[in-house]
Image (tube, rainbow, N blue to C red):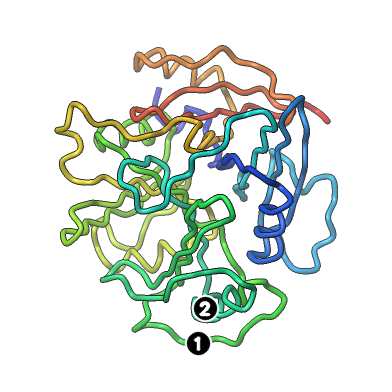
Amino acid sequence: MNVSESGITQLAQLSLQISNPDVSLPFYTEKLGMTLLAERADGNETRYFLGFVQPGHQMTKHDFDPSAWQTRSYLELVHKRHDPELDVRKQPDVNEGYWKIALSVSELDIAHARLIKNGVEVDSPRQVGDIAYLCHFSDPDGYCIELIQHDFLQNHQSIPEDVSYALGSRPTFSLITYRVKDVEASLRFYTEFLGLRLLSVQPVPTREFTLYFLACTEEAPPHVNLEHVGNREWLWQRPYTIVELQHIWGTEKRNDFAYRTGAESGFESISFATRDLSALQDLAAQQNMTISVVESDSTLRATTATVVDPDGYSVRLIDKAAES
């Protein structure tokens, strides 16, 4: 079976645990401008689904709808009332597997000023080499968040502030970033099994790491050479969510090294929606991987299964949702 037959439709969501929804939800909705699309409780845990919607949009029962996974990825915040305290370590901690999310905006300086005005501690915007114009801050639990401008500082043409958006311009849930040890094994998993397309490769020799960007898309970057600098601003302008894998050089040679990828770090899972879960099960068997027993997920109201990637990150596969 080739990847086009594997049934993956889109990156569905990132799931992170939070310690206090009364603090986290206002942060994401009021300071970043995300919308709480759904809230679902099951036993001792509650899951909150957030995404960006157009200002003035009238919410309907279809706003959180698995069929929308073809065009939108969600952030799922999970509150577990009886779990031990979270241990979210400050970035950049190179032993920590999960790194950050990124939001892309057309006007980074305006977004930065809006965050400062709203009491968020954020570092200064800067052009990082020939990669991006960006800045960083943290959410209430310490998860790192990056803001990326659509274009490089030297290429930027300012546009007026749009006060209908919390960040001053329309944001996109742009990146989900984590670290991998054996990048060749990881690329095989995400491209050959999950069917993602490699869009950009960005070596950073001064920091001794390489960044790999993958997405569920048929789009091709402007330049065939995936290391071409001309692909990078294009990447930050994509309207969909991209997986960013960071490979720190030499980690693949350290037999005693492994990234911290378990739930204690706060990272719960990254999820992909699929048209045909059974096809993925067959593909996993061909590649000597094991998918967990399929179960009904009451909060997603869908059939799900779980597989782990080469570094031990939990990858959830979400089949066609049951009728509400």
Q: Secondary structure at mark 1?
A: loop
Please tell me which residue is depicted at 43% across the width and 46% down the height of the picture. 89
Please tell me which residue is depicted at 74% across the width and 41% down the height of the picture. 65
Place of residue 187 in the rendered image (x, y in percent of width and height, measured from the top left): 31, 37
Q: Looking at the picture, tell me which residue is in the foreground, 29 or 198.
A: 29
Please tell me which residue is depicted at 37% across the width and 36% down the height of the picture. 191
Q: Looking at the picture, tell me which residue is in the foreground, 79 or 161.
A: 79
Mark identifier at residue 107: 2
Q: CA distance from mark 2 to mark 1?
A: 7 Å
Q: Secondary structure at mark 2?
A: loop
Which residue lies most toward the front here? 85
Please tell me which residue is depicted at 77% across the width and 49% down the height of the picture. 63
Give whichever of discs 2 and 1 has the lower sequence position: 2
Q: Looking at the picture, tell me which residue is in the foreground, 309 or 136.
A: 136
CB atoms of marks 2 and 1 within 8 Å: yes
Q: Looking at the picture, tell me which residue is in the foreground, 196 or 245.
A: 245
Q: Which quadrant holds the N terminus?
A: top left
In the rendered view, does 141 fall on the left or right side of 301? left
| Residue underneath mark 1 | 158
Amino acid type, residue under disc 1 in the picture: Ser
Place of residue 189 in the rendered image (x, y in percent of width and height, measured from the top left): 36, 30
Q: Which quadrant holds the C terminus?
A: top right
Q: Is residue 106 above or below residue 4?
A: below
Q: Is residue 55 above or below residue 205?
A: below
Q: Residues within 10 Å of mark 2 (few under 14, many from 20)?
A: many
